[in-house]
Image (spheres, coloured by chain):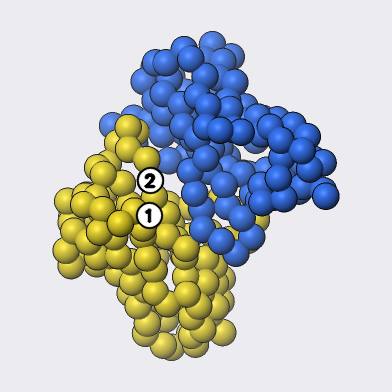
Chain colours: A blue, B yellow
Amino acid sequence: AQTVTQSQPEMSVQEAETVTLSCTYDTSESDYYLFWYKQPPSRQMILVIRQEAYKQQNATENRFSVNFQKAAKSFSLKISDSQLGDAAMYFCAYGGGSQGNLIFGKGTKLSVKP
Amino acid sequence: DTEVTQTPKHLVMGMTNKKSLKCEQHMGHRAMYWYKQKAKKPPELMFVYSYEKLSINESVPSRFSPECPNSSLLNLHLHALQPEDSALYLCASSFERGQYNEQFFGPGTRLTVL
């Protein structure tokens, strides 16, 4: 069975600084997707970034980028130039198998200090 | 329209009540999901519908009854709930089931069972 581990329950970053959230996963599959979702307090969960396992190039979306290390089964999220609106719970998720259900990590609560 | 809507936003019910949660999407997605999310926890998958047919029931108690009247609409009927069922109920949709398909989440219904 696949598992997703986020080892940092809480993180804090100063506004305009850079922060990296960690995620590791375990799977025996070779074809899968990885996602980072953001859930602000009392607000909707939205997709931040996705990575296809067959792509070696790390995904980037504006200030958000990932460091995908397939052999190490590591998928970290880097947020550059942190903004107050980045404060949220961040969930790492694995999507794989024929059913393609999402398997979530426990989440990392990110605080941004002004 | 790239939105998943859910009604109501908040619901308070007694243990003997019958109520329903509603989810709607107009993105032409053929897979729809119900998740339960407790505070500071990741979403837990409850049900998956694919092409309006129930594909997955993750051992959810029978007091939760899903219904998919058409490809755009998903309901969750609630009856004789327990206080421990109080949670945020999230609906999501994707183009199809499978790991290649990003899931779009609704804002959720916050349910309180008294």
- Name the secondary structure under disc 1: strand
What residue sits 31% from the left and 46% below the top?
B94
Does B81 appear above or below A84? below
- Subunit of mark 2? B
Residue A3 position in % (x across, y down): 53, 32
Q: Residues within 10 Å of mark 2 (few under 14, many from 20)?
A: many
What residue sits 37% from the left and 40% below the top?
B102
What residue sits 43% from the left and 40% below the top?
A102
Residue A49 position in % (x across, y down): 50, 35
- Name the secondary structure under disc 2: loop
Q: Nearer the viewer, residue A93 or A65?
A: A65
Q: In this view, does B106 lie to the left or right of B110?
A: left
Asked if both marks, 2 and 1, belong to the same chain, the answer given is yes
Does A8 appear above or below B30? above
Q: Nearer the viewer, residue B6 or A102?
A: B6
The quarter of the picture where the C terminus of chain B appears is bottom right
Q: Residues within 10 Å of mark 1 (few under 14, many from 20)?
A: many
- Subunit of mark 1? B
The disc label shown at residue B103, or none: 2
Q: Disc 2 to disc 1, how far (Cα)?
A: 6 Å
**Callout 2, which amino acid?**
Gln
**Callout 1, which amino acid?**
Ala
Residue B56 position in % (x across, y down): 29, 50
In the figure, residue B46 lies in which quadrant? bottom left
Callout 2–callout 1 Cβ contact below 8 Å: yes
In the figure, residue A106 lies in which quadrant? top right
Q: Which of marks 2 and 1 is nearer the N terminus?
A: 1
The disc label shown at residue B92, or none: 1
Q: Is residue B113 left or right of residue B70?
A: right
Q: Which of B17 and A14 is in front in this view?
A: A14
